[in-house]
Image (tube, rainbow, N blue to C red):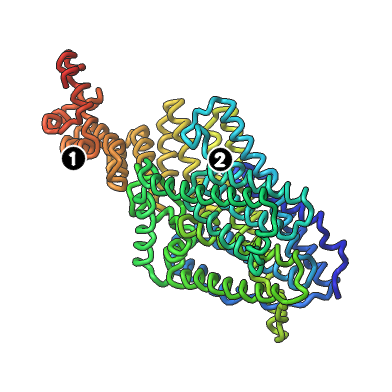
Amino acid sequence: MPIPRSVFTRPLLLTVTLYFLNYGIMFVTATTPLTLMVNFGIMGLLLVWWGIARWRGGWVWHRTPLDAALFLAGGAALLSLLGNMEDARRIGVGIWTLAGYAVLYYVLADVLANRAIAKILVIDGLLLSGVLILWAGSLQLYTAVSNGWRFPGFFGLPRPISLTGNPNFYASVLIMLLACVIGRWVTARRLWMRGLLALYGGIALVHLFLTYSRGGWLGGAALFGVGLWLSLEGVPIMTRFRGLRRSVQALLILVGALAIGLVGTVSVLIIGSLDDPGRTVGLRTYLWEVALTMFSRQPLTGSGVSTYSKALRELISTPPVTPHIHAHNLALHALAEMGILGLVAVLLTLGISLWAGRVNWQALRLPGATRTERGAFIAGAAGMAGMGVHLVLDTTVILAPVGIMTVLLLVVLTSLPQPVPMVWRWRRLGHGLALAVLSGLLLAAGLWNVGLYDQSFMINQQAALTEDYYQAAQALDVLIAADPTNLGYSGQQATFYGLAAHLTGDPEAARLGAAAAQRALVADPSGAVGWANLGALLWQSGDREAGVAAFAEAARRAPLSWQLALAWAQHAEQVGDADAARSAYSQVFTLFPDAVLLPSVAASPSAADLSPDVPLTDLALVVRLYLDGDPAAAAAQ
């Protein structure tokens, strides 16, 4: 029998969606232990509420279209763990996230299949959550205008990020909000409601343009294409157009011309942006090459969920290359981290989603389908079309709000009008038991981790207030003992000991810091910056030979960083290793010839042997002439 409306009420679902998407899991807010504790508490209560609703309502389990794809994705994730046990802690975090998305999918699919809520309520929840998101983005732009339009984005404005922390993430959120606007537009009958939707959509569209996210722009084009096609399907457009007043016809023609102009402008901007510093094609292709290299190394298991950033540090000089945690392409990212099975799972999800969408659309064309059902489906289809295109150029689903919004729209798109109940008793029992156990494990693991994070948070706060970094470093011993595979705690401890050594000159603090840094590097030796920090700690502790070796390792792991090579050269020279110093300076001058003008380099005997042969840039030649006291020659140059 249907459950009472009091169990899953509209205010409850809207409030929960509003909380999580505006505060609980947003990038700029989900950083305090208290927030995370509240999040897990609410999640636990929702799961209990769902269980009570199932029991009271006599719900039945249904098959979902994505069962096979999710089962395959889960198997690929577990296989990636078994094949890379040395990174079990890191991979476990990634699997926890994927499992959380799976639980959300099955819970919402179950609620919809048992007719507890309508799909349109999910769309309303997203639209309501978007109000504060758009307000935060607008406030950012207003503040920029108040400060004099002095930013590097369009019209002197910054690229808005709202609550997400990144323009590309914000673009994904805007894509899905715009899809919901289109879906709700189909259902709106009153002029005032369409006016509000037009205002909402207009603000979102302006923000999407200002994000300067090329993937977001292309995703926006896809969502509008699919949304308009589905909205106008079967509508006698020309007949209706001829029946309008001439003034309205002229307005529509003007809007169409502006839309065509906007598409042309965006196309020109996308092409032009390929030459922008920091946004060239090469800054994406190398990420894809890393993903393909990762796959070639371990085609069956991949390198493990959430290990892309580690592999990038191993394969690319970081620094100067900016660290990335994803491959800017969902299919390649899955291929790199979960092997061929991960890619098959992504493609299978895509294929099944298209099939389920077609089935739903055919059902909505039959007599009896309501405008509300049609609008909800259009929102889901347009949103997933936009996200599908965006995920070809980015992997924004790694951010929790984007991932959760994507899952919500995916459920709306794929939930069938006549869901098929599970027939076999063992499958019904197994499905329910698996979801219950998985949910419990996720909550338990999350609460345990947040408990440790709370202690770490307090230690950091106390260290910032008292500047007693030695005591803070010692306090971390408890966390390291409780979670020895969490490399973050060892790295944090090394930093605290290093600060204590810097402030007090205590070599013992430096020695303890070096030991902490070495623990982290043994587990993950890929980071060049970690080796440089180790070198500094060893040097300060008095073990200068080992310090030079650590600096050399840092320069080897980041062969394009002249700064790390310079640190190696200067420390090698101080211990009297002239050969190592010359080798390091040679690397410096190859990467950055103008470094020869730096005072510390100019005073170096080892560098002096190489500097006459260093080809300087024109600007460096001018500077050298000025330094040599010949301004006339400098002006002529």
Residue 427, picture quadrant: bottom right
Q: Quadrant of the N terminus?
A: bottom right
> Which residue is drawn at the image coordinates 53% and 62% (left, top)?
388
Left or right position of 339 against 436: left
Q: Residue at x 35, y 66 (%)?
A: 297
Is residue 359 shown left or right of residue 265?
A: right
Name the residue beneath numbered marker 2.
160
Q: Are marks 2 and 1 in contact (CB under 8 Å)?
A: no
Q: Secondary structure at mark 1?
A: helix
Report x, y in % for residue 108. Answer: 71, 66
Closer-to-camera residue (44/589):
589
For badge 1, the amino acid type reads: Ser
Mark 2 neighbour density, 10 Å: few (under 14) some (14–19) many (20 or more): many
Callout 2 secondary element: loop
Query: Looking at the image, can residue 166 be seen?
Result: yes
Comparing 553 with 296, the one in front is: 296
For the residue pair 82 and 224, the one nearer the viewer reads as 224
Q: Residue 583 — which label?
A: 1
505 over 62 or under it: above or below: above
Q: Is residue 1 above or below residue 44?
A: below
Residue 408 image position (x, y, % from top left): 66, 61
Q: Position of residue 135 (x, y in %)?
A: 67, 40
Identify the image quadrant of residue 126. Answer: bottom right
Quadrant of the rendered image containing residue 587: top left
